[in-house]
Amino acid sequence: MSTYKLTIAAAFSVTLVALAAPAFAAGQLAYCKADAERLCPGVRPGGGALKNCLKEHENEVSIGCGKELKKLKAEMGK
């Protein structure tokens, strides 16, 4: 394979990963997307910042998001 083709393939792969990263850790907290946009504008996923923000607003999140936060909390043993 030529260097050009490898470069294109690598760039495409990096783009796919970058687009998928904010997807709430591969589907985790999928029901919280709208709540995150509403309650945590400007907070970017990564390092637990978005989850912490949602936990701070746990009384304001939708039912589905609240259930996912409870499940996450149980899995973490807290």
Image (cartoon, rainbow, N blue to C red):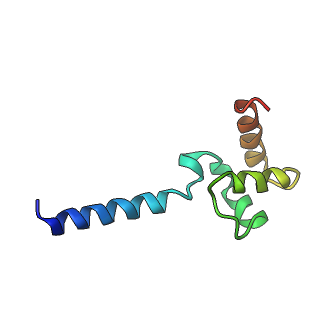
Number of callouts: 0
Q: Is residue 67 left or right of residue 1?
A: right
Residue, x 79% and y 64% (percent of image)?
A: 39
User: Which corner quadrant of the image does residue 37 belong to?
Assistant: bottom right
The percent coordinates of residue 67 (x first, y second) are: 75, 40
Identify the image quadrant of residue 14: bottom left
Q: Position of residue 26 (x, y in %)?
A: 53, 47
Quadrant where the C terminus sits is: top right
Query: In the image, is residue 44 above or below residue 54?
Result: below
68 relative position to 12: left or right: right
Residue ID at (65%, 63%): 44
Task: Tell which of 56 and 31 is nearer to you.
Answer: 56
Q: Position of residue 21 (x, y in %)?
A: 52, 57
Relative height, residue 77 to residue 53 (above, below): above
Give 78 or 65, whichever is nearer the viewer: 78
Q: Where is residue 32 in the image (x, y as percent from the top left)?
A: 69, 53
| Quadrant of image for the N terminus | bottom left
The residue that appears at 76% across and 36% down in the rendered structure is 73
